[in-house]
Amino acid sequence: MPDYMLVLRDDREYFQTITPDEMQRCIQKYQAWAGSLRAAEKLVGSDKLVDGAGRVMRRGKGPLKVTDGPYAEGKEIFGGFFTVRAANYEEALKLAEGCPHLDYGGSVEVREIEVMCAKPTPSAAVRS
């Protein structure tokens, strides 16, 4: 069964205007939604990105350049992700439909993950 990445793009303006109590209610909605995915054994993993800029690396045909960023020119920024296990895109979309991010002006991009190499087993990683 394939895995799908749910890429969360934030509406920066929305989250800058809510109160701490409203933010706490948002967090509780995400926790409940993720808990339901976990209970259904559909949640593979998730993480929120730290607020603020990261670094962007580019080489192309020249020397490596590292710059601060990315800076969102538009109103949406990549804020985090969930990885879910689903039989197909239709099921992945159904799982993503319940994501609270859609209630707060954000968007969810659903992408199938193409496995490029075998994941190590715990016993293989422990060998000395």
Image: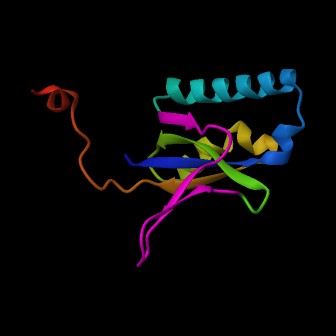
Colour scheme: rainbow
Q: Is residue 38 left or right of residue 34?
A: left
Q: Is residue 6 left or right of residue 25?
A: left
Q: Is residue 20 left or right of residue 66?
A: right
At which x and y percent is residue 120? 22, 38
Residue at 11%, 27% in the rendered image: 127
51 and 64: which is toward the camera: 64
Seen as rendered, the residue at the extreme left is 128
126 and 109: which is toward the camera: 126
Residue at 79%, 47% in the rendered image: 12
Seen as rendered, the residue at the extreme front is 63
At which x and y percent is residue 7? 59, 49
Q: How many marks?
A: 0
Seen as rendered, the residue at the extreme bottom is 61
Q: Is residue 94 above or below residue 122?
A: below
Residue at 77%, 28% in the rendered image: 26
Residue at 47%, 52% in the rendered image: 88
Q: Is residue 11 left or right of residue 97?
A: right
Location of residue 125 (image quadrant): top left
26 and 92: which is toward the camera: 26
At which x and y percent is residue 31? 64, 24
At which x and y percent is residue 27? 72, 26
Location of residue 100 (image quadrant): top right
Q: Is residue 20 visible?
A: yes
Q: Is residue 43 visible?
A: no
In the image, which residues are magenta?
A: 43-71
Q: Is 3 included in the stretch rendered in magenta?
A: no
Which image quadrant: the C terminus?
Answer: top left
Q: Is 48 included in the stretch rendered in magenta?
A: yes
Q: Is residue 54 above or below residue 70?
A: above
